[in-house]
Image (cartoon, grey):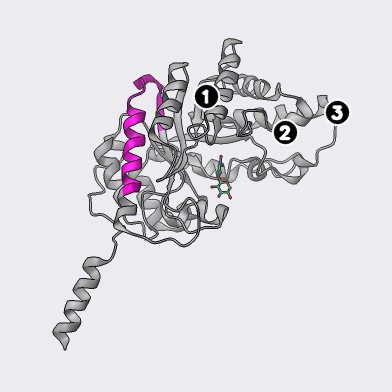
Amino acid sequence: MYRKILIVLILAVACKPKQTESCALEPALYQLSDFPIGCAVDLNQREFNPTYARLLGQQFNQLSPENIMKPEHIHPQANYYHWSDADSLLSYCQKELKSLHGHTLIWHQQLPPWMEDFKGTEVEWEAMFKDHIQSICRHFKGKVRAWDVVNEAFNEDGTLRNSIWKQHLGAAYIEKAFRYAHEADPDALLFYNDFNLALNPKKRAAVLSYLKNLKQRGVALDGIGLQMHISIAFPENRAIESAFQDFSKAGFLVHISELDISVNPYGGTFQASADIWERQAQKLASVIGLYKQINDSKQYGITFWGLSDADSWIPSAFNREDYPLLFDGDYQAKAAYCKMKESL
Ligand code: XIL
């Protein structure tokens, strides 16, 4: 009887689709890489979850704040900037010798209500916009490696999104944002950041030609953030390659700025299997391989949008089960993590 139970148990363990993979955590990801390896940081997790903090500190050498530098958090009232959370992340980065990637100055989401409801002439709007950008850039002057100056300004059809910024300042707000940021911190690298630039060639072409034009006109614009919220099913590797090549050949630094690889992109019931984790690992290996093909001088770095599957924004934002990151919900390395180490 006991033998039977034992055999059933052994079979059950052996057949359970395993998500975690055993490969050493050291050397760490960033130690294997020629370019920075980043992670979006959740402030509460870093401060209150020791497992999270240990793994984050060990594996990554560049951090992006997931939320605490966004307008609603850092500029919650017209005459008040809330610096303490971002300052605490900055001092952690300085102490641990990690670079800090500022995210994000101008966006249409996560705005404080006072900003969305702002009433004023075009001149007053521009003064408010300039004060927002320059107060933040001056506060962190010389301390952040780069800023995502403008985030997600384009629609999927390649036209400009009708954000409050476009409505009140016109299309020129993009150029103005870069000029103001550069004036306040001339040493910070400045990025335009957006999603679906690999998946959607129409959007990619529109963004590329817009940015080239700004650059030709002398705007301090150093790079493109390709968010890369992708999946095991799409985009095709050829599209990813085109995105990396198009922007790097046009002279822009390329930041894979918000990488996650969905295993359940269409939603619905999710069935875990060893094959799924392998496909996720393979997709990541392809992304890294293609990124390494661009000129070294254009490789700004790769940032994952979260540490473990328990920290990912995807399940709540899209209301679906998903496991898009390198570590599982118990902070154990997945096949993708091990594959990444072979690919770097
Ligand atoms: C997401 C965060 O991960 C969530 O915690 C938050 O609730 C919403 O924003 N594009 C971006 C990121 O540029 O700032 C977004 O981050 C994800 C999409």
Front position among marks 2 and 3: 2
Please give the range of residues in magenta. Answer: 279-301
Prevailing SS of the magenta stretch: helix
Residue 18: x and y in percent read 28, 60
Q: Which residue lies under the disc numbered 3?
A: 121
10 Å crowding of disc 2: few (<14), some (14-19), many (20+): some
- The residue carrying mark 1 is 188
Is 328 drawn above or below residue 114 in the view shown? Answer: below
Within 10 Å of the Cα at label 1, are there few (<14), some (14-19), or many (20+) other Cα atoms? many
For marks 2 and 3, the one nearer the N-term is 3
> Dot 3: what SS?
loop
Q: Is residue 89 above or below residue 6?
A: above
Question: What amino acid type should be assigned to the residue bearing mark 2?
Answer: Asn
The residue positioned 36% from the left and 23% from the top of the image is 294
Examine the rendering and report whether any part of residue 144 can be seen: no
Q: Are marks 1 and 3 in contact (CB under 8 Å)?
A: no
Determine the image quadrant of residue 126. top right
The stretch drawn in magenta includes residue 291: yes
Q: Nearer the viewer, residue 234 or 99?
A: 234
Q: Quadrant of the C terminus?
A: top left
